[in-house]
Amino acid sequence: MYLKQYEHGRTYVAKLNYQSDLYEEINKICIDENIKAGWISIIGAVSSLKLGFYNQETKEYIYTTYAYDEPMEIVSCTGNISLKDGKPFCHLHITAADKKGRCIGGHLVAGTAVFAGEVIIQELLGEDLVRDIDEETKLSLWK
Ligand code: ZN
């Protein structure tokens, strides 16, 4: 169990550039603005989508089999910001729908092209929220 209390800090609204990389753009905002903790909400659409899936047995992310090369709506993309290796780091998950409304989702990685993106970032102020390798899962989790 992990429980800490934070206060609200700055609130950001961003419109992402056409064909920018969804993950890289969000991560860049957090680094440029030095947002050390927070939460993120994104809606919009993507021209292509790349997802990761963490294989709990092999303790590795699978990327290539979850790459979708087609336009999709961002139904929901949420995540958090914390510190990894001393720098702001975004952890984002996304659900996206195709033209028939069928959804897929997973862990967002670099390689997703933005068609349109509306972002809200809420900074959280308080004790540093730091990621490090977790022994049981081998994931970089909050410590
Ligand atoms: Zn994840």
Image (cartoon, rainbow, N blue to C red):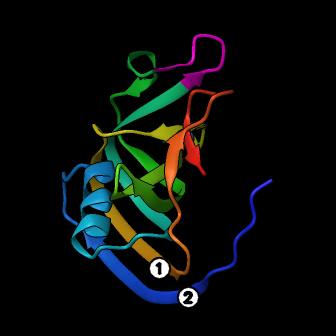
Residue 142 magenta-highlighted: no
Question: Residue at left 65%, top 12%?
Answer: 57
- Out of 126 and 45, give the one closest to the viewer: 126
Q: Mark 2 points at which residue?
A: 8
- Out of 142 and 25, give the one closest to the viewer: 142
Query: x and y percent of residue 127 in the render?
Result: 55, 74
Disc on the earlier residue, 2 or 1: 2
Query: x and y percent of residue 16 in the render?
Result: 26, 66
Residue 86's tag is: none
Contact, mark 2 vs mark 1 (Cβ under 8 Å): yes
Element type where label 2 sits in the image = strand
For label 2, being within 8 Å of ligand 1 is answered no
Residue 60 magenta-highlighted: yes
* Residue 51 higher or lower than 61, as above or below: below
- Out of 134 and 55, give the one closest to the viewer: 134
Q: Mark 1 points at which residue?
A: 123
Q: Say left or right for 111 vs 129.
A: left
On the question of residue 19 being in view, the answer is yes
Task: Identify the amino acid type marked 1.
Answer: Glu
Q: What stretch is highlighted in magenta?
A: 54-61
Question: Residue at left 70%, top 71%?
Answer: 4
Task: Identify the amino acid type marked 2.
Answer: His
Query: x and y percent of residue 130 in the render?
Result: 50, 57
Q: Say left or right for 59 vs 87.
A: right
* Residue 93 higher or lower than 124, as above or below: above
Question: Residue at left 27%, top 76%?
Answer: 33
Figure quadrant of residue 68: top left
**On the rendering, which quadrant does ligand 1 occupy?**
top right
